[in-house]
Image: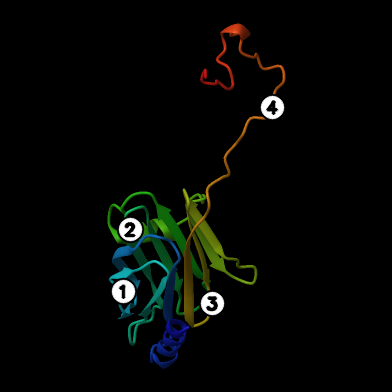
């Protein structure tokens, strides 16, 4: 709760008219490390934490530049030993004309290539899948959920001038074991009964 209050306080007190505060809650068993970010427009106000331990929450804040005609947009990425992910955000200066946007992508390997190229790819019109989702915030906006293996990321973003983007990282249980149904027609052992070992044996007195 302290992190949430801290994030909202930063956004309220920031003099910039456009901002994006990102809150990441890590409920997995792995530690998120090696954060990296790219600003297409705007700048970093509160940098991302160097690491996010299991069962913890961290925040960072991006804001528009003073006197800039643009809003704030960019990309934030984290890596771990088992997966990595990137989140793209777009808070335009004229949100009555251009809608807010955000996207999340999860990877089984480290992120390769430049973050600028990745930002343009996630911002662009590309096919969506279970590992990549993008959402335009309008009256029918919904949350984003991506997954890879047992790891799942859920995300939401508000369409305010000072926007909040929340990500929840979780591990989902694997599928239950599959058992074949009993088949009475399945061939039984043809091992001669007289050659089978007895169920119990007794020592001679």
Q: Which residue is mark 1?
A: 49
Cα distance between the residues tagged 2 and 1 = 14 Å
Tell me if mark 1 has few (under 14), some (14-19) or many (20+) residues whose alpha carbon lies within 10 angstroms of its own. some
SS type, badge 3? loop
Tell me if mark 2 has few (under 14), some (14-19) or many (20+) residues whose alpha carbon lies within 10 angstroms of its own. some
Query: Residue 31's spot in the image, x, y percent?
Result: 34, 63
SS type, badge 1? loop
Query: Residue 24's spot in the image, x, y percent?
Result: 43, 71
Q: Which residue is mark 3?
A: 159
Q: Is residue 192 visible?
A: no
Location of residue 52 (image quadrant): bottom left
Q: Which mark is residue 80?
A: 2
- Say which residue appears at 57% left-offset and 65% top-offset: 143
Location of residue 196 (image quadrant): top right
- Say which residue appears at 46% left-offset and 48% top-offset: 149
Q: Which residue is mark 4?
A: 182
């Amino acid at each position: 709760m302290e992190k949430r209050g801290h994030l909202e306080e930063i956004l309220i007190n920031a003099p910039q008219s456009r901002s994006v505060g990102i809150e990441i809650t890590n409920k997995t068993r792995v530690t998120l490390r090696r954060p990296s970010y790219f600003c297409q427009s705007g700048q970093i106000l509160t940098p991302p934490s160097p690491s996010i331990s299991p069962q913890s929450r961290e925040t960072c804040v991006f804001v528009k530049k003073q006197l800039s005609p643009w809003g704030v947009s960019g990309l934030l990425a984290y890596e771990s030993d088992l997966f990595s992910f990137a989140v793209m955000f777009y808070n335009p200066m004229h949100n009555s004309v251009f809608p807010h946007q955000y996207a999340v992508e999860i990877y089984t390997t480290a992120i390769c290539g430049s973050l600028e190229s990745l930002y343009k790819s996630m911002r662009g019109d590309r096919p969506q899948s279970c590992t990549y989702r993008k959402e335009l915030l309008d009256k029918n906006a919904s949350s984003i959920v991506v997954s890879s293996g047992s790891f799942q990321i859920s995300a939401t973003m508000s369409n305010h001038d000072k926007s909040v983007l929340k990500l929840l990282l979780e591990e989902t249980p694997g599928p239950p074991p599959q058992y074949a149904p009993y088949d009475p027609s399945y061939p039984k052992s043809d091992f001669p009964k007289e050659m089978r070992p007895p169920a119990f044996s007794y020592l001679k007195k």
